[in-house]
Image (cartoon, rainbow, N blue to C red):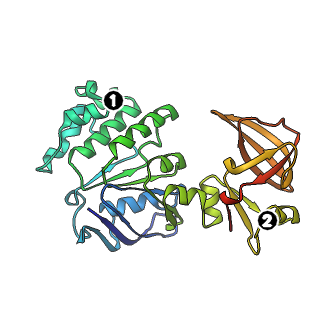
Amino acid sequence: MTLSVDIEATFTARGADPFTTAAAFEVKRGETAVVLGPSGSGKSLLLETVAGFHSHDGSVALDGTDLTSKAPENRRFGFVFQNYMLFPNMTVAENVRYGDRYHETTGDAAELLAELGISDLAGRYPSTLSGGEKQRVALARSLYVRPDVLLLDEPLSALDVPTQTRLRQDMLDVLDGVTAVYVTHDRTTARTLADRILVMNEGRIVQRGTPDAVFDRPTSQFVAQFTGSNCVPLDTDDLRSAVDGSGNAEYLAVRPENVRLDNGSGDVTARVERVVREDAVFRVTLAVSDHRIDAYTTDPPAPGSSVGVSFEESASTLL
């Protein structure tokens, strides 16, 4: 089961300039492709267009069968919305089984509720549920119709961080073996769930690859910064001499975990501006020339002190 997408669609909102989103990609059977991008990049419009909610040029095909002329309800796609979209007058079980009205072949509602840990909610109404519970119900409803492809539009973004973390881990099991396209602006979610990542900006896919390839080997300044790397301008002799083979490169992209701090020596000297605890590590913000660089460490230097800084060459990218 391969989903093939090659589309271009233009949208016009009152008082705004037309916005065009265009993408070409394939999702193999059982693969989770995550479309990662900032707000306004066009990723949700892309997902809605794949679902059939908007007209477009090009094609959406499943195993070679063009679905472009098919209505959304006839594409056998499941869609998980950011804002749940549950029917308030139906119980949890009734919401999950809503697909019986449109699909002859469906799953086992009780089994899905158990898999998502919400069996005890079957008789309750959406107004009595927490955000995390509502999203689990919405996910169960989409899976109940046994979709050929599951489309997910930032389903975790409205949840608090602990709930996001728990549901993200649960979704690893839920999405195992499911062909899915997942849209998010959250890089932790992307790196956790994706088999492949498509980075989107201004309506276009600007980089694609495995999570490690995208996060560790960005191909542009935008991708480097959006995925959390330092993007250091190589505009001083000290910085250029710290990077072998810099040539005509303008920037060095290096993740905070690949910046080494050394009290004794280093490729360049930096002043410690800030130290912030982030779970099991400290984020250290350093001033190097006129630039700011972040580093992760378990043994932070004192703010105001000077430290040597080195960049792991094998884990750095020249742009």
Residue 93 in the figure: left or right of residue 277: left
Quadrant where the C terminus sits is bottom right
Q: Quadrant of residue 139?
A: top left
- In the image, residue 229 lies at what x, y percent? 66, 54
Task: Tell me, for residue 192, which label it has, or none.
Answer: none
Question: What residue do we see at 38% from left, 59% from top?
Answer: 47
- Which amino acid, by three-letter code, is at mark 1? Ser
Q: Secondary structure at mark 2?
A: loop
Residue 235 in the figure: left or right of residue 141: right
Question: What residue do we see at 27% from left, 46% from top?
Answer: 142
In this view, the residue in front, 58 or 174, is 174
Question: What residue do we see at 83% from left, 55% from top?
Answer: 267
- Which amino acid, by three-letter code, is at mark 2? Leu
- In the image, residue 304 lies at what x, y percent? 88, 39
Quadrant where the N terminus sits is bottom left
Residue 153 in the figure: left or right of residue 304: left
- In the image, residue 100 lies at what x, y percent? 14, 45
Residue lying at the far left of the rendered structure: 104
- In the image, residue 274 lies at what x, y percent? 79, 40
Spatial CA span between label 1 and label 2: 55 Å
The mark closer to the camera, 1 or 2, is 2
Q: Residue beneath label 2, please?
A: 234
| Above or below 318: residue 135 | above
In this view, the residue in front, 75 or 286, is 286
Give whichever of discs 1 and 2 has the lower sequence position.
1
Q: Residues within 10 Å of mark 1 (few under 14, many from 20)?
A: few
Q: Secondary structure at mark 1?
A: helix
Q: Residue beneath label 1, please?
A: 127
